[in-house]
Amino acid sequence: MRKKVILLTGASSGIGYQTAEFLAKQGHTVYGAARRVEKMEPLKESSA
């Protein structure tokens, strides 16, 4: 599978958060946008 760069809005909760986490764990580069940026901190671990 080819790795992609993905921009995802609404990544601080719900479906946006789950999608960002899933895609990052698949090895894609995910850029998340949200109003509550602090709620996306745990996603940093998904990309490791």
Image (cartoon, grey):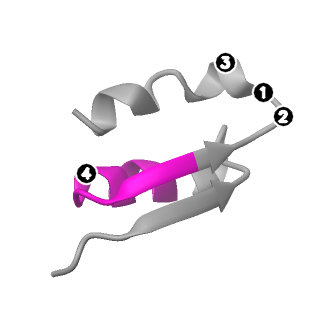
Residue highlighted by disc 2: 35
Q: State the CA–CA distance, disc 1 to disc 3.
A: 6 Å
Quadrant of the rendering where the C terminus is positioned: top left
Report the quarter where the N terminus lies.
Answer: bottom left
Q: Using the image, tell me which numbered label, if any, was put on residue 38.
A: 3
Report the residue at 84% width, 34% height from top: 35
The answer to the question of whether label 2 and label 1 lie on touching residues, with beta carbons closer than 8 A, is yes
In three-dimensional space, the C-alpha distance between marks 3 and 2, rounded to whole angstroms, equals 9 Å
Residue 24, percent from left and from top: 34, 51
1 in relation to 19, above or below: below
Q: Is residue 42 left or right of residue 25?
A: right
Q: Which residue is mark 1?
A: 36
Q: Amino acid at mark 3?
A: Glu
In magenta, the rendered stretch is: 19-31
Considering every residue shown, the one lying at the far right of the view is: 35
Between discs 4 and 2, the one toward the N terminus: 4
